[in-house]
Amino acid sequence: MTLLLRNKRSDILVVLNFLMFQAEIARQEARLKMERDNLEKEKSVLMGTASNQDNQDGALEITVSGEKYRCLRFAKAKK
């Protein structure tokens, strides 16, 4: 009888550990989905085009979400 109870306890612990593991996976998947959705929203907002038309001042023209910007001076990012 004692052996049978120990086996039942260990089986219950295994099942509980499995359920906790599955719940953690579900939480992480939900968090990753939210992060991916947020990144997609940011990406759609920040999508734009850049063109260097033959401007007399050599300005770089950038259009983001229908708004035009002119960059008169720019430099490479420092490492």
Image (cartoon, rainbow, N blue to C red):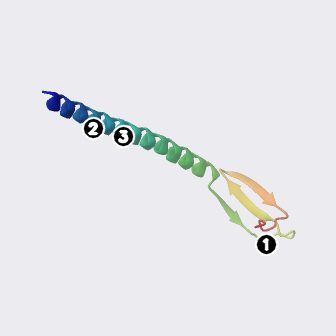
Q: Secondary structure at mark 2?
A: helix
**Type of amino acid under label 2:** Val
Residue picked out by circle 1: 54
The percent coordinates of residue 72 (x first, y second) are 85, 63
Residue picked out by circle 2: 14
Q: CA separation, marks 1 and 3?
A: 60 Å
Q: Closer to the observer: label 1 or label 3?
A: 3
**Type of amino acid under label 1:** Asp
Q: Closer to the observer: label 1 or label 2?
A: 2
61 versus 24 height, above or below: below
In the image, what residue occupies the spot 19% across and 34% down?
A: 7
Of labels 1 and 3, earlier in sequence is: 3
Locate the N terminus and report the quarter of the image it occupies.
top left
Residue picked out by circle 3: 21
Of labels 3 and 2, earlier in sequence is: 2
Residue lying farthest bottom? Answer: 54
Disc 2 residue crowd, few under 14, some 14–19, many 20+, Cα 10 Å = few
